[in-house]
């Protein structure tokens, strides 16, 4: 027997072992994208201080989708989008329609929003903070409906486009985000050290088809897209990052997902050149990962999902709300009025909220996905639990409010306390918030077969 | 009078006052550049760990020059280079020669090295301590150093020949790929939720625009060691990639990188070409942002001042100290101890001080301080506290004799505070007066250049 034959035999054995394990096929993926820039100049989401609707587009807003299918035919769908957040109603509707059409459960669907603050207001989201007229509300309702249908059609298209691919994953790094709670923005140029906690990771998944063409670049970062606060539609820094990557890699779709950015801002901010700079920096971090060795993922997909009962602290009484109403102005007054009316009408305020926690395992790549404006310590702690290579997504499936760590909750301030009123919630979270979420994440992660190191 | 003639007169009226301010009485600038990539494979500078000469080129190494002339005809010249350092031996010769040829004194010349660790070894005092070169490789270094010296002198002349009317603007940007390498553990970086300072994230930028409104030069800096790469290919490291990115974005423009107080700052993570490119692109993105935003126009008045201040060494080692060091050490520390011992045996007296270059330019309203050596970051932070946060700080200028630790770093010791002195062939550490001597000299020099204390 010649040496080459031995080699061939080995190779045949190796290939057939893989074929036995994974069938004829490895991963399949389908990619689709659709512009969701509003055709009308409707109200823009994210800031209470805007006084008028949008006045034009800096660049298009996008919804993008990747469907994954493993060797056994298990599927999952990731949707990323240049919007502030999917409110629960919208998300539930979209996921239910996709379940009916394609048989995908909530575990198999992630609807992630970039949280751009230069996108449209959606129905049922932060309604107390915007000075919106009934006409504008109609436009918002119409846009919300249309956008939901666009996302459902996007899933159809992505599934139609399934083709054999390889998947690879690795983390990169960049540092334009700043912990906004622990660093004063106005002194930034004079500070020799920026306080944490921070997570500088840039998670990247590379999707390459059988011809070796780069089909999709899925990447994330944990940082508020709040560089811009003007009146032009834009994806903020994630929009610029996606444009840069798609320019560098013609034919590829770049999908940005938001991480645990609740308390992270890009600083300094407020100018278009800065949004562009941060987009370029993020794209540069992704391009570095794409050029280096990445971990190849075996074609095994597992998904899991739960809604944890996240408890509110002691609910306010009618007297508490009257006191707040009398002593406040703006959105806090509106909130006290709205909640006060409910209490007066003997409507029971909710004592808890169903918080979505999800886990995907792509080969040996762990991905933990949470709803809400998750603060950075969750990302740090989940990586301590599941390993530093874990990908953490937030702002997915439902954005009901900020999700403070126990530390942030106890410190109070915007992310710990007052943002609850912005979101129209009855009161702050109970101090069990952190341990309940982490425990649920561990349970869901283990159901998806993610081992604890 | 026909309308057209009237228009011409009007246009003339508009142009002539503008000319008298901005062209005849404004700034002039000239730029030049030349590739200085060694033609032969030779020893590479910066890491003691390399065990063979270079093996190829990732991209060209450059020498670039910007000559400035203010409305009164007062001139200065900035030369930047993709080299490890302008050491005193050649820096003095170069500046004397440029001075003689063009009537410039040392205050008017800045030689700044990017400190790339993927450039050629140049002749200096530490040559035989850290680089294990064979005699023929040593000869290559001597020949390259002579060539390099001549190229620097030549490029100054070219830049001065190219003087044309320009406008100058300045502003600081920001990026954060550098990490204080003394106070952060590189091996746990991905698991650390906070990076310890001190750090200076500033990206100083000067824009030079010619009279017909074309971007002539982008002068920019950052305080961070170009030590992403440690291989065997010539490159400017991240500053090289940043300059290439900017010159690609702005065809016809020269992008000149200057090193800041990067002594204790590393680009982390590091060690791959894609990372060097990432950091280069991030730095270029920070510069682009500054260029797109409003910058501060600089009035056409230039002043410059320069001093060499004696910075004191601590107590010199005696023969017994050095004999002990010889037997207690290996590697470059042992080579150093042997060399120092030999000097003592030959009757050499160790110097008690070193002439340290401190320079200040005031470019219109823009203060700029250029210091020698591997300046650590606290100097930049302190000088900005003294002169204002918009001040531009250069390190690695005119001479790189060793690290320049702050009092804190000197007392902490370690590489930048202590053992680097041996790598540089100095006989002992700096005296604890170093920080106050340098800061006071900077204040004096700055004031001589007309920079006011806020």
Image (spheres, helix red, strand yellow):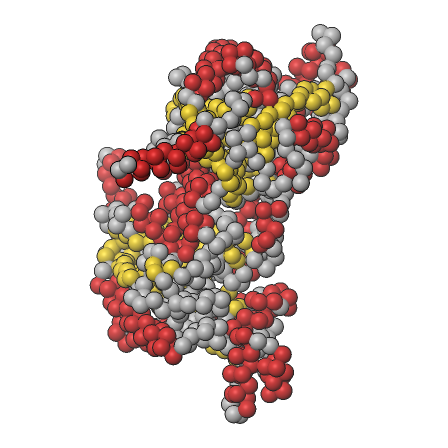
Residue B454 % position (x, y): 67, 40
Task: Tell me what residue is drawn at x 48 percent, y 23 percent.
Answer: B67
Residue A445 in view here: no
- Tell which residue pokes out farthest to the top in this image: B346
Left or right: residue A401 versus residue B381 is left
Task: Tell me what residue is drawn at x 55 percent, y 17 percent.
Answer: B104
Q: Is residue A342 above or below residue B367?
A: below
Residue A170 % position (x, y): 42, 50
Left or right: residue A150 versus residue A341 is left
Residue A382 % position (x, y): 52, 61
Residue B58 % position (x, y): 39, 29
User: Could you say which is closer to the camera, residue B164 or residue B15?
Assistant: B15
User: Could you say which is closer to the camera, residue B208 or residue B124?
Assistant: B208
Q: Is residue A179 above or below residue A248?
A: below
Please identify the quadrant where the N terminus of chain A is shown: top left
Task: Tell me what residue is drawn at x 37 percent, y 74 percent.
Answer: A136
Q: Is residue B88 above or below residue A337?
A: above
Residue A438 in view here: yes
Give the quadrant of residue B301: top right
User: Could you say which is closer to the camera, residue B30 or residue A68?
Assistant: B30
- Tell which residue pokes out farthest to the front in this image: B1
Left or right: residue A296 versus residue B411 is left
**How many labels were placed on the picture?**
0
Q: Is residue A7 above or below residue A346?
A: above
């Amino acid at each position: 027997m010649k040496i080459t034959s031995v080699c061939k035999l080995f190779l045949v054995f190796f290939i057939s072992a893989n074929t036995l394990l994974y069938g004829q096929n490895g991963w399949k993926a389908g990619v689709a994208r659709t512009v969701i820039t509003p055709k009308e100049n409707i109200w823009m989401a994210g800031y209470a201080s805007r006084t008028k609707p949008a006045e034009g587009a800096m660049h298009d807003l996008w919804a993008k989708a990747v469907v994954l299918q493993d060797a056994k035919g298990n599927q999952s769908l990731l949707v990323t989008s240049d919007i502030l957040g999917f409110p629960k109603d919208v998300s539930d509707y979209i996921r239910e329609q996709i379940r009916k059409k394609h048989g995908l459960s909530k575990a198999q669907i992630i609807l992630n929003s970039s949280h751009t603050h230069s996108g449209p207001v959606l129905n049922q989201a932060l309604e107390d903070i915007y000075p919106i007229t009934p006409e504008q509300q109609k436009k918002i309702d119409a846009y919300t409906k249309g956008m939901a249908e666009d996302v459902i059609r996007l899933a159809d298209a992505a599934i139609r486009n399934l083709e054999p691919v390889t998947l690879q994953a690795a983390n990169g790094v960049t540092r334009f985000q700043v912990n906004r709670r622990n660093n004063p923005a106005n002194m930034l140029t004079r500070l020799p050290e920026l306080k944490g906690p921070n997570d500088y990771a840039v998670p990247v998944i590379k999707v390459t088809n059988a011809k070796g063409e780069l089909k999709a670049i899925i990447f994330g970062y944990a940082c508020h897209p709040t560089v811009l606060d003007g009146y032009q539609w834009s994806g903020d820094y994630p929009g610029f990052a996606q444009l840069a990557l798609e320019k560098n890699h013609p034919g590829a779709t770049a999908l940005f997902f938001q991480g645990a950015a609740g308390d992270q801002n890009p600083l300094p901010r407020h100018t278009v050149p800065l949004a562009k700079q941060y987009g370029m920096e993020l794209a540069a971090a992704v391009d570095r990962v794409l050029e280096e060795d990445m971990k190849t993922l075996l074609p095994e997909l597992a998904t899991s999902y739960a809604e944890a009962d996240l408890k509110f602290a002691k609910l306010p009484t009618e007297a508490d709300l009257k006191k707040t109403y009398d002593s406040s102005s703006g959105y806090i007054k509106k909130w006290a009025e709205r909640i006060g009316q409910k209490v007066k009408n003997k409507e029971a305020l909710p004592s808890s909220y169903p918080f979505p926690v999800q886990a995907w395992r792509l080969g040996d790549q762990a991905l933990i996905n949470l709803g809400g404006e998750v603060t950075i310590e969750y990302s740090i702690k989940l990586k301590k639990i599941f390993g530093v290579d874990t990908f953490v997504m937030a702002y997915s499936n439902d954005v009901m409010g900020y999700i403070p760590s126990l530390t942030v909750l106890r410190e109070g301030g915007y992310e710990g306390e007052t943002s609850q009123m912005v979101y129209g919630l009855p009161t702050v979270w109970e101090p069990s918030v952190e341990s309940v979420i982490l425990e649920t994440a561990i349970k869901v992660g283990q159901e998806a077969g993610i081992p604890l190191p | 009078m026909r309308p057209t003639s009237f228009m011409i007169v009007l246009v003339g009226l508009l142009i002539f006052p503008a000319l008298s301010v901005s062209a005849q009485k404004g700034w002039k600038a000239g730029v030049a550049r030349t590739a200085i990539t060694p033609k032969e494979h030779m020893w590479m500078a910066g890491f003691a760990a390399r065990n063979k000469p270079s093996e190829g080129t990732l991209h060209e190494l450059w020498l670039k020059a910007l000559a400035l002339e203010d409305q009164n005809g007062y001139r200065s010249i900035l030369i930047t280079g993709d080299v490890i350092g302008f050491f005193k031996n050649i820096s003095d010769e170069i500046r004397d020669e440029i001075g003689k040829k063009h009537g410039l004194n040392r205050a008017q010349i800045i030689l700044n090295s990017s400190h790339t660790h993927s450039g050629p070894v140049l002749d200096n005092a530490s040559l035989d301590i850290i680089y294990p070169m064979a005699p023929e490789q040593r000869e290559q270094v001597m020949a390259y150093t002579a060539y390099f010296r001549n190229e620097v002198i030549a490029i100054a002349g070219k830049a001065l020949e190219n003087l044309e009317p320009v406008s100058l603007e300045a502003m600081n940007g920001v990026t954060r790929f550098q990490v204080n390498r003394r106070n952060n553990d590189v091996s746990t970086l991905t698991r650390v939720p906070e990076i310890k300072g001190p750090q200076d994230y500033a990206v100083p930028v000067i824009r030079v625009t010619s009279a017909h409104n074309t971007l002539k030069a982008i002068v920019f800096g950052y305080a961070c060691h170009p030590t992403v790469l440690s291989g065997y290919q010539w490159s400017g490291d991240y500053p090289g990639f940043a300059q290439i990115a900017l010159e690609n974005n702005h065809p016809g423009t020269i992008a000149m990188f200057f090193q800041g107080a990067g002594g204790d700052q590393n680009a982390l993570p590091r060690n791959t070409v894609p990372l060097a490119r990432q950091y280069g692109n991030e730095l270029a993105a920070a510069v682009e942002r500054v260029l797109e935003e409003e910058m501060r126009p600089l009035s056409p008045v230039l002043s410059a001042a320069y001093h060499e201040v004696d910075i004191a060494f601590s107590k010199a080692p005696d023969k017994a100290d050095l004999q002990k060091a010889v037997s207690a050490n290996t590697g470059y520390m042992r080579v150093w101890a042997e060399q120092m011992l030999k000097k003592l045996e030959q009757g050499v007296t160790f110097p008690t001080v070193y002439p340290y270059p401190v320079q200040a330019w005031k470019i219109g309203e823009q203060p700029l301080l250029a210091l020698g050596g591997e300046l650590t970051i606290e100097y930049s932070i302190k000088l900005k506290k003294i002169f204002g946060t918009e001040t531009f700080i250069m390190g690695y200028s005119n001479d790189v004799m060793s690290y320049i630790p702050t009092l804190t770093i000197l007392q902490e010791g370690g590489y930048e505070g202590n053992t680097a002195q041996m790598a540089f062939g100095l006989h002992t550490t700096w005296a604890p007066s170093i920080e106050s001597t340098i800061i006071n000299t900077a204040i004096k020099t700055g004031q001589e250049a007309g920079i006011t204390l806020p």
